[in-house]
Image (cartoon, rainbow, N blue to C red):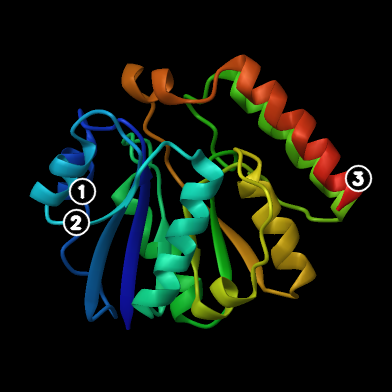
């Protein structure tokens, strides 16, 4: 089976090389691994560092936002025709050690989408983000009947069926939640696995600000109510 690991990145030149080099060169039951970086209009040396580390790079001419970047990477997963497509963050928060567990339900044909959950074991997660995620998860459950512990996680695995059926409209941080809503509407099978999140001063500085988090929350409410 073929695996594609696709990473959206904006001004991650300081760490993207290290993140790519930390990824496994081989995995059990996987015959080929492609690594792709979606460079979302970075103004630093993200693209050069990613290429130097051996990744394929897709460039946005301007910074289009995380939602557009994720749409690009999901389309890239289709074009690569990989059996499993994994999305992960570029700031080093996601541990490559979790990859085998993340892709196993896809390989075993037990799920179409697998979400890595930080909240099953939330050790070290900043309290504000923990509480906000819990609130978003509750809202998602009440309004969309989707019971998931971490609706905001970007560490996910998809099969080709999921990539082809997802119909996405939003372009902001709320896209991770919209993916879950679209997956339910498409009757895709979803499951979660626990992941370890690596919090560093750098990764914390790259996360959503409180203002952005609140804006995302408001957009999410609007999305859930209006569809």
Residue 98: give x, y in percent of width and height. Answer: 37, 53
Residue 101: give x, y in percent of width and height. Answer: 42, 62
Confirm or deny contact between disc 2 and disc 3 (CB under 8 A).
no
Whether residue 111 appears in this view of the structure is no
Residue picked out by circle 2: 55
User: Circle 1: is it few (<14), some (14-19), or many (20+) Cα within 10 Å?
Assistant: many
Q: Earlier in the sequence, mark 1 or mark 2?
A: 1
Q: Residue furthest front?
A: 61
Whether residue 47 appears in this view of the structure is yes
Residue picked out by circle 3: 225
Question: In this rendering, which labeled residue sits more in front, label 1 or label 3?
Answer: 3
Q: Secondary structure at mark 1?
A: helix
User: Circle 3: is it few (<14), some (14-19), or many (20+) Cα within 10 Å?
Assistant: few
Q: Nearer the viewer, residue 140 or 163?
A: 163
Q: Earlier in the sequence, mark 1 or mark 3?
A: 1
Q: Secondary structure at mark 2?
A: loop
Q: Please tell me which residue is depicted at 46% across the width and 48% down the height of the picture.
A: 69
Residue picked out by circle 1: 20
């Amino acid at each position: 089976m073929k695996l594609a690991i696709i990473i959206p990145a904006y001004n991650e030149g300081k760490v993207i090389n290290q993140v790519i080099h930390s990824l496994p060169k081989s995995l059990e039951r996987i015959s080929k691994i492609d690594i792709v970086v979606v460079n979302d209009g970075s103004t630093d040396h993200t693209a050069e560092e990613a290429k130097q580390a051996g990744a394929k790079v897709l460039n946005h001419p301007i910074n289009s936002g995380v939602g557009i970047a994720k749409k690009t990477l999901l389309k890239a997963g289709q074009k690569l025709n990989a059996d499993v497509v994994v999305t992960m963050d570029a700031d080093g928060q996601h541990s490559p050690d979790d990859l085998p567990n993340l892709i196993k339900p896809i390989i075993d044909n037990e799920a179409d989408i697998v979400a890595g959950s930080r909240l099953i074991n939330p050790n070290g997660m900043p309290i504000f983000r923990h509480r906000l995620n819990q609130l978003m998860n509750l809202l998602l459950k009440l309004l969309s009947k989707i019971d998931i512990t971490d609706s905001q996680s970007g560490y996910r695995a998809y099969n080709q069926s999921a990539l082809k059926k997802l119909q996405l409209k939003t372009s902001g941080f709320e896209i991770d939640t919209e993916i879950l809503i679209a997956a339910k509407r498409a009757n895709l099978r979803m499951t979660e696995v626990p992941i370890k999140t690596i919090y560093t001063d750098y990764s914390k500085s790259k996360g959503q600000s409180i203002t952005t988090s609140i804006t995302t929350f408001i957009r999410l409410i609007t999305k859930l109510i209006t569809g």
